[in-house]
Image (cartoon, grey):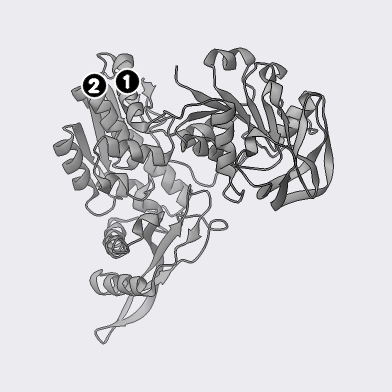
Amino acid sequence: MREWIAILDYGSQYTQLIARRIRERHVYSEIVPCGISVAELKARAPAGIILSGGPNSVFAEGAPGIDPGILGLGLPVLGICYGMQLMSQTLGGAVEPGTRREYGKTRLRVKAPCALFEGLADELDVWMSHGDRVTAIPEGFAPTAVSANCPFAAMADVSRRLYGIQFHPEVVHTEHGMEMLANFVFHICGCRGDWQLASWAEDTIARLRREIGNEEVVLGLSGGVDSSVAAVLLSRAIGPRLHCIFVDNGLLRAGEATAVEDAFRARFSLDLRVAHAAPRFYAALKGVSDPETKRKIIGREFIAVFAEEARRIGPCRFLAQGTIYPDVIESSSPLKGPSHTIKSHHNVGGLPPDLKFELVEPLRELFKDEVRAVGRVLGIPDAFIDRQPFPGPGLGVRILGEVTEEKADILREADWRVQEEVRKLPWYGRIWQTFAVLLPVRSVGVMGDQRTYEYTCVIRSVDSVDAMTADWTRLPHETLAAISSRIINEVRGINRVVYDISSKPPATIEWE
């Protein structure tokens, strides 16, 4: 049985980061609902359990709790922030609202030997984010660290292998936080650290072969990282019984359709069907300028075209999707409350009733960087593995106002120049996303002694880790100058180029 660490999710913004940090040490970790039962957890036999932080107070009505039996399973447990407070409250300790909220970098002083801090200095800078604090630890526990405002910044019951820390070791702001998590995973839980993505790929291909049997599978291949890796995994498992559909909606980047056909037909011998549906999308978008309406129209038409192609293939039992772990977490979190719709997302959902599929999601337990690593193991070209994110609605959300074929052609040409120039940078791989946006704004210019009245193009480039937050890229002036010169001189219809220096938040990465 594969060794793994269970992370009970109490809603912290850092929960995914805990999972990533542990996987970086080659130990599989999985985020599970905080309401998981003792029976289910015992049946799945994790090597250890981590209780994540969370935004709630343990005193708040409806605050998430824990089945006390989980703490009595005999497994190592690490409570982080809210997790420590919950552990303390559940086992008979005391938690009270703090007189001073402790947020940000704090000096931690280790006051007693503890396996969590093994090999580390007695004083460390750690990242705190809490209002409540533990004021009396449960029977059997000993205090192991303090901070200026927190008399029990860490505690441990060594005999029961229960540990609590008030700070967040998973964030980069905590000095030697990775070592603390490694101490828990290896020294306390006894993990070996033998989880490798190469063996994961082999195991997944074998599992897909068993689960799918002799059935047929249909997959929407976009050419993006996730769908590309999913397609190759499935192809290795079931060969020609995988049928891929690529929808050319007229809103793709320059050369996109040809590149996908060449790579996946020639190199991987996939059954790839390309639906050339650009006129249909342009007609549906005629006269529409509201961004959310555009997204919904593009999604609706995509589903319609995909459904038509799927019917031509014939009966398929399974629908494959490139769903990855962050998608699963965000859609299934038990603590996720109502939120405003910022942007609707494009996916193969809402298919007609006559197309009934069972879902196959081979990547649903991997993070994006892990998906890329698997792609390299499978031999997928770097041009697809290292590509920057591209929105499902494509250029439709980078053309502000009404989308027309003329505007799409103009933006496609401008964006191609942007990509060519930015790829020349030696640190191009560190940029999260760079692209062009076409504004519904015309301005006066002079070209060849003649007056022009043409569109404005915006260049957007951002640095990010997970797209939740982003800062604008400090592109060299020489690169910006080259981009501007090439667009204005080579792309008919644009006479002005500007650079977007907004961060997220408050701005989003995409303009629509």
- Amino acid, disc 2: Ile
Disc 1 designates what residue?
A: 208
Disc 2 designates what residue?
A: 238
Residue 506 visible in the displayed image: yes
Q: How crowded is mark 2: few (under 14 residues within 10 Å), some or many (20 or more)?
A: many
Task: Say which residue appears at 34% left-offset and 46% top-offset.
Answer: 284
Helix, strand or loop for disc 2: helix
Number of numbered discs visible in the structure rendering: 2
The part of the image, by quadrant, that contains residue 208 is top left
Task: Say which residue appears at 18% left-offset and 24% top-offset.
Answer: 240
Q: Is the residue under label 2 in contact with that under label 1 (CB below 8 Å)?
A: yes
The part of the image, by quadrant, that contains residue 195 is top left
Residue 427 numbered tag = none
Q: In this view, does 239 lie to the left or right of 178?
A: left
Front in this rendered view, residue 128 or 386: 128
The part of the image, by quadrant, that contains residue 378 is top left
Helix, strand or loop for disc 1: helix
Q: Quadrant of the N terminus?
A: top left
- Amino acid, disc 1: Leu
- Residue 435: x and y in percent read 37, 59
Task: Say which residue appears at 42% left-offset and 46% top-offset.
Answer: 295
In the image, residue 332 above or below residue 212: below
Residue 66 visible in the displayed image: no
Front in this rendered view, residue 18 or 390: 18
Q: Is residue 229 left or right of residue 503?
A: left
Front in this rendered view, residue 124 or 455: 124
- Residue 111: x and y in percent read 75, 41
- Residue 138: x and y in percent read 80, 27
Q: Earlier in the sequence, mark 1 or mark 2?
A: 1
What is the C-alpha distance between the residues marked 1 and 2?
A: 8 Å
